[in-house]
Image (tube, helix red, strand yellow):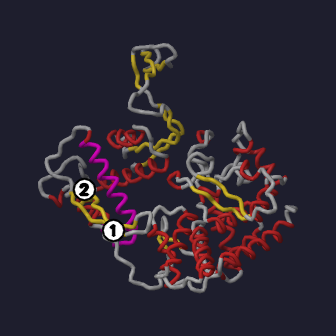
Amino acid sequence: MRVRVEVIRKLLVYEPTMEVGAGMESLDVGQRGNKQTYAKGIKQKFIVQCYYHYPFVIDGDGSLWGAANRYLLSYLEGADPAKYRTLESAAGDLRSYRQWTLDNDIDYLYIPKRRRARPTYRYCYYLHEQLLKGTIKINTAKRKMSSVQRLYQWHVLNGMDFDYSLWIEGDVRVNYKDNQGCSQSKNVKTTDLIRSFKTAKNSSDYDEFIDDGGKLRPLPKKEQTALIDSLCRVANIEMFLSFMFALVTGARLLTVFTLRMGIFFKVRLKNMKEVKLNIGLGTLVDNKNDKQMVLHVPGWLYDRIHIYLKSDRYKNRVTKSLHVYEDEGQQYVFLTRNGRPYYMSEYDPFSSLYRNPARGNAVTQFIRQQLKPDLLAHGFDFTLIFHYLRATFGMNLLEEKLNEQGAYDANKPEVFQVLMFIRERMGHSSLTTTEGYLNYRHKFYLAMQVQGDFEKYLESISHKFGESYDLG
């Protein structure tokens, strides 16, 4: 059997004890006629007593890999337990490492004198081989190596001594820009294993990707127009509105599909050209790393969603939903025909209903099975993922603001003001990420249509599309 990861819907965290106290649940252990009753005592190291969608690493013989699973459990200690996606990623990396050790008959805890024979160095070499074959990307290799390092670090913290070093640590000077855009540098601890995965700088002056939480490709105006026309032909109102929302706000997939009804209850005042929407920690709308920020929703799009939520189509989906909230305003805006969310919030109390909470797979499936075939049938063949819409918004907005300022010289002070504006609207933690959009524009994207003009086109298409759904 192969090493695998199994996810259980609900992990109860407790410590069996013979000391039964008031209000404590009982736990029966053993077979009939030979049972022992314990009480479920509170495990002091853990803030949470229950964790949903917890992954276990199952060894090749079907048993639990004890060390890996105790290590994963340590993620739940402390004041801020890890989220499901973090645990899922760590478990997957450890599964890969365990499989490699079994395939090569390697005892991962045996550290020989010869450095190149130590499991950490051998695994590093194996990952480099996979890079050369093209089976993994360099960021994946770094992540897998880091996960293995953390497993060994956990062993050391728990009292295990190794005869020889597992890697060589050192300091690396890292340059970065602070919140004011000033160049700074700092020392960062790293290892020779991680440093071995060197990322070559792209020498192309016409790279078609921007590094913004992944390699993103802003869509040129021609492709944006083709995409919107395709969405109209496919005639899926949920996908139409959600794609529109991403295009004009820059919201990520997890944000768009965790929007809630209550946000759109009020009728927009006619003098409000846009509606400001708070997302992130403290709201019901998810954002990357729980970052708090404000989205600016154009009034015309707010109105279309407001009307859609009153439609029979939406109401039918709500009636099928297993998520029955005390406050109906907490219901998701975008639901599948079966009443399920396209993306389930990290904090949704109904997540335990699902073995695998929705993470946008249905959106990817829609692009692959409906959008792409339609685009191809009309003569368009370009790569498309939902996250490209965020990069497209960033480029549209940048072009609009540069035109407003008449700032085409990167050295002008007005350009810095524009960059700070873009950074705030997109929620970038680093100004360097925002500068990537400016560099992209100078090198590759000078023919981009401005955001203002393109929004007018989107609005006109939205009204035309809404007529077929009686959206007013």
433 left or right of 364 in image = left
Above or below residue 274? Residue 458 is: below
Q: Which residue is mark 1?
A: 175
Closer-to-camera residue (295/87): 295
Closer-to-camera residue (17/92): 17
Label 2 residue SS = helix
What residue lies at 39% left-to-right and 39% top-to-bottom? 73
What residue lies at 49% left-to-right and 46% top-to-bottom? 84
Above or below residue 121? Residue 228 is: below
What residue lies at 57% left-to-right and 56% top-to-bottom? 293
Closer-to-camera residue (304/402): 402
Look at the image and give the residue range highlighted in magenta: 128-156
Q: Which mark is residue 382?
A: none
Q: Which residue is mark 2?
A: 120
4 left or right of 348 in image = left
Question: Can see residue 267?
Answer: yes
